[in-house]
Amino acid sequence: MIKYSNGQNFTKKPEKSSKFSINSTSFSHSNRGMNLEEDINLSNEYYKANESCLVTKRPTPINVVSVDYTKGAVITNAYFEKQSTTDYNGVYKGRYIDFEAKSTQKTSSFPLANVSKHQIDHLKHVLKHGGIAFFIIEFAKLDQVFLLDASYVIEYFENGTRKSIPYQDVLENGHQIKKGLAPRLDYLEIIEKNYMNS
């Protein structure tokens, strides 16, 4: 038995598992402040673990210029090689899925300044080739998240008459995503109901 210098017994604490657990009881209401990307990543991990679908976050393409190996291979200089397209892509029941996740603090509209032209061009190509393309939009102050088909965002973006999509339009044309424990954001349920029979 190991003892501290003060005579007390040493008790080894159990190591925490770093592996994602679907049935983890450590997930509590205190985790509800997570940002949108974390919520989607947790949902995707759940979907993958349950073999529902495979959706991954695209890495940001960077070109590494220099690395400091004295500090354990720390990148000290790098730049973005090119503009990234959208945040997520994957496959569900043989259908290609591609989407962008955006969050806004506004309560009355979703600003189109949050969307880049190259993202619009990319999603147009996805739609042209029969893929499923959409935006997941969070109205953070309202604690609401919606799945909005990319065609609506493309139409607003290319129309040029407005700088934002009114909240009421998102409410009417989008689908509010249920929040839960596992998955955190069940966007797959919406895809199944609205895209898989078309």
Image: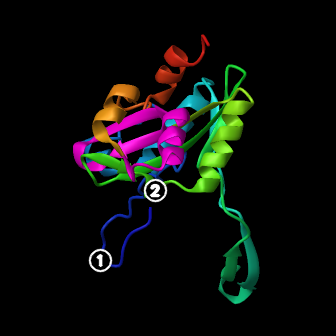
In percent of width and height, residue 59 lies at 66, 56
Asked if residue 57 lies left or right of residue 148, the reply is right
Location of residue 176 with respect to 38 vertically, above or below: above
Crowd band around label 2 with a 10 angstrom C-alpha radius: few (<14), some (14–19), many (20+):
few
Amino acid at circle 2: Asn
Amino acid at circle 1: Asn
Asked if residue 108 lies left or right of residue 172, the reply is left
Quarter of the image where the N terminus is located: bottom left
Label drawn at residue 114: 2
Which residue carries the number 1 mark? 6
Crowd band around label 1 with a 10 angstrom C-alpha radius: few (<14), some (14–19), many (20+):
few
Q: Which residues are magenta?
A: 135-164
Query: Is residue 21 in view from this perspective?
Result: no
**Foreground: 46 or 124?**
124
In percent of width and height, residue 92 lies at 65, 25
**Residue at the location (69% across, 79% down)?**
78
**Closer to the eye: label 2 or 1:** 2
